[in-house]
Image: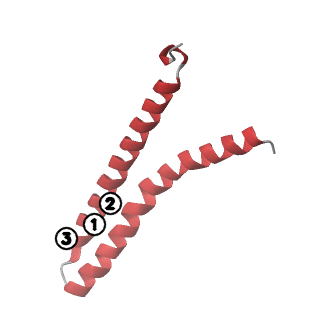
């Protein structure tokens, strides 16, 4: 496997982790909230709160990563180069 193949593989794996984060972060946080709800007897409050906060956090993270990547691509674009 050449260095460009490795780089392309790593970049594709990095992009796919966003999908896993989008699913598993809210799920794990909701499970933690569920456990705390059982402990404190407040059943759906913390489950929903933790799940929604995790989802919002992941979406914000993905948006900021996307913007940073687009800015980097714009800076490296042929039309943005100065002589």
Q: Which mark is residue 23?
A: none
User: Disc 2 on helix, strand or loop?
Assistant: helix
For the point 80% across and 42% down, which residue is it?
Answer: 2
The mark that comes first in sequence, 3 or 1, is: 3
**Image quarter of residue 41:** bottom left
Question: Which coloring applies here?
Answer: secondary structure
Q: Which residue is mark 3?
A: 45
Q: Observer-nearest residue: 40 or 58?
A: 58
Q: Given contact means CB atoms under 8 Å apart, are the residues at marks 1 and 2 in contact?
A: yes
Picture layout, residue 63 above or below residue 40: above
Point out residue 81 in the picture as x, y percentages from the top left corner: 51, 17
Q: Which mark is residue 50?
A: 1
For the C terminus, give its image quadrant: top right
Point out residue 1 in the picture as x, y percentages from the top left corner: 81, 45
Q: Which residue is mark 2?
A: 54
For the point 25% across and 65% down, which residue is it?
Answer: 48
Camera-nearest label, 3 or 1: 1
The mark that comes first in sequence, 3 or 2, is: 3
User: Disc 1 on helix, strand or loop?
Assistant: helix
């Amino acid at each position: 496997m050449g260095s460009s193949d490795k780089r392309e593989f790593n970049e594709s794996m990095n992009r796919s982790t966003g999908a896993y984060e989008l699913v598993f972060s809210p799920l794990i946080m909701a499970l933690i909230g569920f456990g705390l709800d059982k402990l404190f007897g407040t059943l759906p409050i913390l489950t929903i709160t933790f799940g929604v906060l995790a989802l919002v956090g992941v979406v914000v993270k993905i948006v900021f990563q996307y913007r940073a990547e687009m800015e980097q691509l714009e800076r490296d674009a042929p039309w943005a180069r100065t002589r």
